[in-house]
């Protein structure tokens, strides 16, 4: 699969390398989803792991656990710098979206503020209220007009600022956001095969790679 | 007629509806690479969350105390569970007795995030486990080997953990159980339909579930560890043996410094394959729980043998 990857990668000679933050959460499911598209994945657990990437995934899991481990591992600032730089495409799902938000409620906690939105953790309720829900894409989003999304103790976007573009909604609530290099979902595209959100992210990674290695992540 | 392994659909899980697979198993996937800590009150729950736990297990007594006190151990008071739910933002799990589906109904009514049908409590039914497909809430169940794991998955468990020997602080039984599950999976590799059918009969589960595991070479649900983990090295050991997360019961709040130990075990699960990091993480943690050798526990007091 990997050997075929360069054939549709815009003339690039190598498969794109996407880092998956692997401190905690469903990083293995993201790896499986990306490998289906011929992407090479690498687990990121240290600052060194952030270098040389063509894309980055902030997976689902528990945002409180991730925040603690980011600080302990010395990743908090380097990851923030990478997110701020906009150098490589980023896919943030569920807990990953919470880490990126401008403001977090229920309860309040620190976040990177690279996604101009305010979110409530577990804003759709406890696990009993988790499930698959059809979401409606905006007409100019280049996504299928309706697709299924798996919400698990999902964050709820309470408001979105002008810098952030809403790509899809669940009964009016924004659930898929894009701001610069960051694509962020309240749900879990990685749990479903060939999800349009995964495909959008992969296309962005390939486009970045095709436009030259200057886009690759650097540390410091 | 058995399904040929080559026809196994790994995108679905035998016996689970697509929605069940996504919502229940999907929830359990989010807990991977994490530590689930036993807590007996809101204060401990806050400490666990602060230490980086991915979830807490709310119960009135940790297994070490259940073992010491004896008597019948039951579901915790819903009031106490609700206090813990109010205190933390991470998922809250709670235990029901094996086969006690009404305790499970009660826990679902108060919206516990995951129900542990647990051998640590006194079994309510010596023949049947809870029919877990009837619930919207995901269940975790313990196992000692692959057959027991598959029986629980067939009943609807969305998460499997080793039983170990809870409340001892001795990891030896958890190791035994994890090795049994992993070698049981490897033994299915390359078997033909007749041989898989024979295994399915022995395990008392449908052929298609055994065929799925033979093909995928893993369980169709996350595979965690529990029962006797007391140190960061114990947690990393279970991860290297194939666990995807670790439950820690008495090991944290029965130790000398629960906060430091909790934080250390959380880091050890992330860096389970990095001995240098583990050396640093293991240093200066104070006294672990005293523990008792699992071998010294009399036959009649062993918790792991509960479950059918």
Image: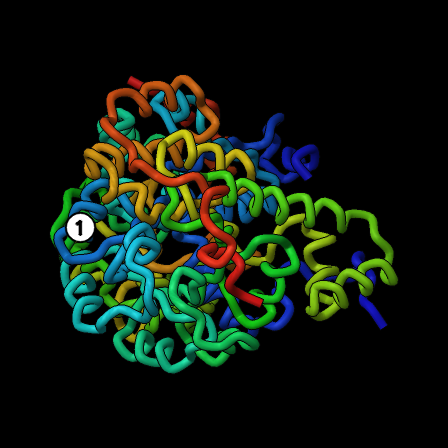
Q: Is residue B166 above or below residue A156?
A: above
Question: Is A25 displayed left or right of B7 in the figure?
Answer: left
| Residue nearest the viewer, comparing B279 with A63 | B279
Question: Is B123 displayed left or right of B103 in the figure?
Answer: right
Question: Is B136 displayed left or right of B37 in the figure?
Answer: right
Q: Whole-percent x and y of residue B242?
A: 55, 40
Q: Whole-percent x and y of residue B60?
A: 24, 62
Count of picture labels: 1
Q: Is residue A172 above or below residue B253?
A: below
Q: Which residue shows up at 68% across the image and 39% down it?
A: A1
Q: Whole-percent x and y of residue A210?
A: 52, 32
Q: Is residue A85 above or below residue B152?
A: above
Q: Which residue shows up at 36% across the image and 37% down it?
A: B230
Question: Is B260 displayed left or right of B9 in the figure?
Answer: left
Indicate the secondary structure of the residue bearing disc 1: helix
Which of the 4 quarters of the picture holds residue B236? top left
Q: Which residue shows up at 19% across the image and 69% down it?
A: B82
| Residue nearest the viewer, comparing A1 with B78 | B78
Q: Which residue shows up at 31% across the image and 53% down it?
A: B68
Residue B273 is at least partly visible in this image: yes
| Residue nearest the viewer, comparing B258 with A6 | B258
Q: Is residue B41 above or below residue B1?
A: above
Which quarter shows the C terminus of chain A?
A: top left
Q: Residues within 10 Å of mark 1 (few under 14, many from 20)?
A: many
Pointer 1 residue: B44
Residue A154 is at least partly visible in this image: no
């Amino acid at each position: 699969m990997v050997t075929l990857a360069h054939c549709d990668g815009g003339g690039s000679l190598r498969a794109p390398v996407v880092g998956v933050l692997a401190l905690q959460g469903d990083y293995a499911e993201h790896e499986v989803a990306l490998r289906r598209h011929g992407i090479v994945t690498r687990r990121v657990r240290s600052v060194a792991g952030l270098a040389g990437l063509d894309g980055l995934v902030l997976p689902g899991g528990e945002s409180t656990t991730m925040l603690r481990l980011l600080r302990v591992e010395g990743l908090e600032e380097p990851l923030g710098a990478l997110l701020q730089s906009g150098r490589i495409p980023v896919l943030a799902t569920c807990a990953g979206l919470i880490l990126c938000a401008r403001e977090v409620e229920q309860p309040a906690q620190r976040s990177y503020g690279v996604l101009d939105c305010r979110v409530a953790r577990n804003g759709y309720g406890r696990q009993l209220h988790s499930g698959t829900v059809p979401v409606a894409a905006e007409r100019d989003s280049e996504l299928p007009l309706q697709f299924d999304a798996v919400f698990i103790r999902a964050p709820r976007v309470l408001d979105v600022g002008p810098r952030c573009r809403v790509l899809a909604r669940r009964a009016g609530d924004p659930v898929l956001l894009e701001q610069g290099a960051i694509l962020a979902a309240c749900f879990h595209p990685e749990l479903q095969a060939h999800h349009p959100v995964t495909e959008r992210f992969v296309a962005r990674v390939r486009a970045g790679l095709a436009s030259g290695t200057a886009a690759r992540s650097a540390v410091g | 007629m058995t399904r040929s392994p080559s026809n196994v659909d790994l995108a679905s899980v035998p016996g689970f509806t697509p929605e069940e697979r996504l919502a229940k198993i999907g929830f359990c996937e989010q807990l991977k690479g994490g530590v689930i800590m036993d807590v007996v009150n809101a204060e401990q729950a806050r400490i666990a969350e602060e230490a980086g736990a991915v979830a807490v297990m709310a119960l009135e007594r940790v297994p070490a105390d259940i073992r010491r006190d004896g008597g019948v151990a039951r579901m915790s008071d819903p009031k106490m569970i609700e206090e813990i739910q109010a205190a933390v933002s991470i998922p809250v799990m709670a235990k029901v007795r094996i086969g006690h589906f009404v305790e499970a109904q009660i826990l679902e009514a108060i919206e516990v995030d995951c129900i542990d049908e647990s051998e640590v409590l006194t079994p309510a039914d010596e023949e049947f486990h809870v029919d877990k497909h009837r619930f919207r809430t995901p269940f975790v169940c313990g196992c000692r080997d692959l057959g027991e794991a598959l029986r629980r998955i067939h009943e609807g468990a969305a998460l499997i953990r080793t039983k170990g020997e809870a409340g001892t602080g001795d990891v030896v039984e958890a190791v035994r159980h994890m090795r049994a599950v992993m070698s049981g999976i490897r033994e299915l590799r390359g078997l033909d339909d007749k041989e898989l059918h024979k295994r399915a009969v022995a395990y008392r589960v449908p052929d298609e579930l055994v065929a799925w595991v033979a093909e995928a070479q893993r369980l169709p649900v996350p595979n965690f560890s529990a029962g006797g983990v007391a140190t960061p090295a114990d947690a990393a050991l279970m991860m290297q043996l194939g666990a995807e997360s670790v439950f820690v019961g008495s090991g944290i709040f029965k130790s000398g410094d629960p906060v430091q130990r909790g934080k250390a075990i959380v880091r050890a699960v992330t860096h389970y394959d990095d001995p240098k990091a583990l050396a640093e993480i293991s240093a200066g943690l104070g006294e672990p729980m005293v523990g008792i050798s699992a071998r010294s526990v009399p036959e009649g007091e062993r918790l792991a043998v509960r479950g059918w």
